[in-house]
Amino acid sequence: MIDYQPLIDHWRNSALDSWAQQLDQQIASGLNHERYGDLQRWLSALEALPQLHAEEIHLNTSRVGARTSQPVDEATTTQLRAALQQLHPWRKGPFELFNVHIDTEWRSDWKWGRLHENIDPLSGRRVLDVGCGSGYHCWRMLGDGAAEVIGIDPTPLFVVQFWALQRYLQQNNIWVLPLAMEQVPPKLQAFDTVFSMGVLYHRRSPFDHLQELKDCLRPGGQLVVETLVIEGELGDTLMPESRYARMANVWFLPSCDTLLSWLRKLGFVDAEVVNVCVTTPQEQRSTDWMTFHSLADFLNPEDASQSIEGHPAPCRAVVTARVPGTWKPLL
């Protein structure tokens, strides 16, 4: 049910041939049963999904998903819901499959609404989404006309979630690969738009991450970064000594001006902030599909403007920039 061979074949003798040559081995490592003890359970849930034929596919609505004109019987709906629940926790979404609403932790549609009108049109573009989770934004990118969308995420559960959706959506030009950014071949220069959303603050070296993203882009291609920021002036950066909003792996939270400076130092042009938004417990919260603690538990109960550790509460910015050069359609 999980088959990447069509993608490998498609990439052969193309600008992505160097990646195609090693992709099979990378996927085997990323979906290694010995390394990931729960993988077989997740794959069993994938196999347990009922056979349903989608008559309507929705990629450009808040709830990405599939429908049929005929009502789905209660037993099949129960089977569908139970199989999808076996893939808990669902972080990014929402989705809706045959009237089963996967109410994910994040209202990722809100983030998409904040950014998609502020980026270069995706029509005809080859797109890379780094740290894509289950691929919610990948589907929205495809719905916006992208010719090919590649998501990468090293968490195998999220990859299996993508394949659960793909079981019904069945789109040929979208893939989520079980890889980290470090596994992307260097200096590809093969993508027209590269997204990094919710990743930069998890990197020990933000400069290295931004350079890796730049190396994936064709001349004139656009980078879209969404990340945690702080209020402040040029040069201001928060580096939490321990945790930030209960997250242990948060390294650097720059001011917007600092982030723009980082991009310019690396040779990006046209760098600009297109959105700044405080994250609220309405956008990130616990649900039946993600029952663990969420944002409300990570804020100071007496002052929601602070994290539980006393840092500024999460605020996110969307920043765009381009690689120098003239962009020309490729696909």
Image (cartoon, rainbow, N blue to C red):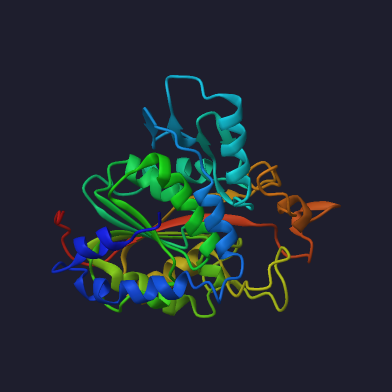
Instruction: Give the residue displayed 65% in from the left and 57% down from the top.
Output: 314
58 shown above or below 299 = above
Kindly identify the residue that appears in the image at 70 percent across and 57 percent down. 313
Q: Is residue 291 above or below residue 74?
A: below
Residue 7 against residue 30 in the figure, above or below: above
Q: Position of residue 81 (x, y in %)?
A: 60, 38
Give me the residue at 49% from left, 56% from top: 160
Name which quarter of the figure residue 9 lies in: bottom left
**Residue 111, position as x, y percentages in the image:** 51, 46
Can residue 102 be seen at all in this image of the molecule?
no
Residue 37 falls left or right of residue 143: right
Q: What is the tally of numbered marks visible in this picture?
A: 0
- Compared across the picture, whether 139 is left or right of 230 comes to left
Q: Is residue 314 at all visible to an observer of this figure?
A: yes
Q: Residue at the far top: name it.
A: 70
Question: Hey, which quadrant is residue 121 in on the image?
Answer: top left
Question: Is 43 left or right of 241, judged from the image as shown?
Answer: left
Q: Using the image as rendered, state which of residue 18 and residue 26 is in the foreground.
A: 26
